[in-house]
C-alpha cells in the first residue's frame, strides 16, 4: 500500500515522528498479545516506514524511545532520544525543542496531505489534533509549547481527546480537529489494516 505522494511540498515548520525503536524487543504489546509478536512487529514496521516516507518531505526529527542498533529503518532522517517522563512530558519536550507538529507512527491513514493540513491549520489555530476512533489522537500540533495541554490526561484511555479538548477550551485556545483516523492497536484493527492493504494493492 502506497500513501499519496507529490513533489511540491512546502514545509511550514518542524515535524516530529514519535516512535519506539524498531530495535526494541517490545513493540505493540497489546497487539502482540492478540496476534503474536512476529505479526505485530511486521505490522508496526510497515506502518512506521510509510509514515517516515511521508515525513521525508518535511523538516523532520524522529524522536525515538529505546536503543537504535540498525539505523536503516530511519530512512536517513535525523533522530533524537525521547525525554524522560510520562507520555505528555515526552511530547511536550518535543515542542519545547522547536517542533510544531508531532505524529505517531501507527496509523495507516497518515499521509503527506494529512501532515500538510496540520501545518496549514496552525495558520489560524493555536492547536491542531488528529483524532482517532479510539478516543485518542495520532497527531498534535501547536504554534508554541503549552504545558497545560498535556497535564492531568489519562493516557492510553478513550478519554484522551476529550480531556485534551476540555483543557484547550478552558485556556481559550483555538483548536482544529483534522479528519478522524484510526490506528492499529488490536486484532480487529489488524484485520482492517490487511483489508486496506488489499484495496490499495
Image (cartoon, helix red, strand yellow):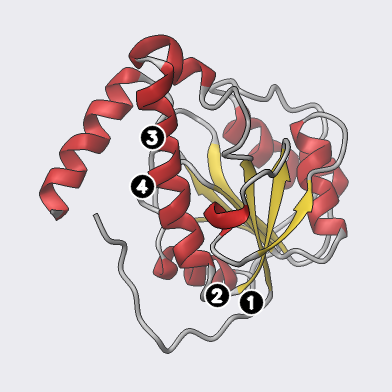
**Label located before the other in sequence (1 or 4):** 4
Q: Report which quarter residue 98 is drawn in.
A: bottom right
| Quarter of the picture holding the C terminus | bottom left
Q: Which residue is mark 2?
A: 120
Q: Are marks 2 and 3 in contact (CB under 8 Å)?
A: no
Q: Secondary structure at mark 3?
A: helix
Q: Residue at x 15, y 54 (%)?
A: 200
**Label located before the other in sequence (4 or 2):** 4
Q: Are marks 2 and 1 in contact (CB under 8 Å)?
A: yes
66 vs 138, nearest the viewer: 66
Can residue 133 be seen here? The reply is: no
**Label located before the other in sequence (3 or 4):** 3
Q: Secondary structure at mark 1?
A: loop
Q: Alpha-carbon distance for marks 3 and 1?
A: 37 Å
Q: Which residue is mark 1?
A: 123
| Quarter of the picture holding the N terminus | bottom left
Q: Residue at x 86, y 46 (%)?
A: 147
| Residue neighbourhood size for the residue with mark 4, other residues' Cα within 10 Å, grouped as few (<14), some (14–19), many (≥20) | many
Q: Secondary structure at mark 2?
A: helix
Which numbered disc, 3 or 1, marks the residue closer to the eye?
3
Q: Position of residue 52 (x, y in %)?
A: 51, 59
Q: Are marks 4 and 2 in contact (CB under 8 Å)?
A: no
Q: Report which quarter residue 67 is drawn in.
A: top right
In the image, residue 40 above or below residue 2:
above
Q: Residue at x 53, y 71 (%)?
A: 56
25 vs 128, nearest the viewer: 25
Q: Secondary structure at mark 4?
A: loop
| Residue neighbourhood size for the residue with mark 1, other residues' Cα within 10 Å, grouped as few (<14), some (14–19), many (≥20) | few
Amino acid at each position: 500500500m502506497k500513501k499519496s505522494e507529490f513533489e511540491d511540498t512546502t514545509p511550514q515548520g518542524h515535524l516530529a515522528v514519535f516512535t519506539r525503536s524498531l530495535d526494541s524487543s517490545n513493540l505493540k504489546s497489546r497487539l502482540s498479545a492478540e496476534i503474536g509478536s512476529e505479526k505485530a512487529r511486521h505490522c508496526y514496521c510497515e506502518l512506521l516506514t510509510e509514515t517516515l516516507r511521508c515525513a521525508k518531505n518535511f523538516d523532520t526529527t524522529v524522536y525515538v524511545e529505546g536503543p537504535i542498533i540498525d539505523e536503516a529503518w530511519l530512512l536517513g532522517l535525523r533522530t533524537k532520544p525521547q525525554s524522560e517522563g510520562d507520555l505528555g512530558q515526552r511530547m511536550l519536550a518535543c515542542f519545547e525543542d522547536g517542533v510544531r507538529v508531532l505524529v505517531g507512527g501507527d496509523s495507516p491513514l497518515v499521509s503527506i496531505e494529512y501532515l500538510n493540513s496540520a501545518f496549514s491549520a496552525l495558520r489560524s489555530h493555536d492547536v491542531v489534533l488528529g483524532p482517532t476512533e479510539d478516543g485518542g489522537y495520532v497527531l498534535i500540533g501547536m504554534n508554541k509549547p503549552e504545558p497545560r495541554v498535556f497535564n492531568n490526561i489519562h493516557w492510553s484511555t478513550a478519554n484522551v481527546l476529550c480531556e485534551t479538548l476540555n483543557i484547550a477550551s478552558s485556556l481559550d485556545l483555538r483548536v482544529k480537529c483534522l479528519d478522524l483516523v484510526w490506528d492499529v492497536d488490536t486484532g480487529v484493527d489488524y484485520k482492517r489494516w490487511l483489508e486496506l492493504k488489499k484495496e490499495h494493492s
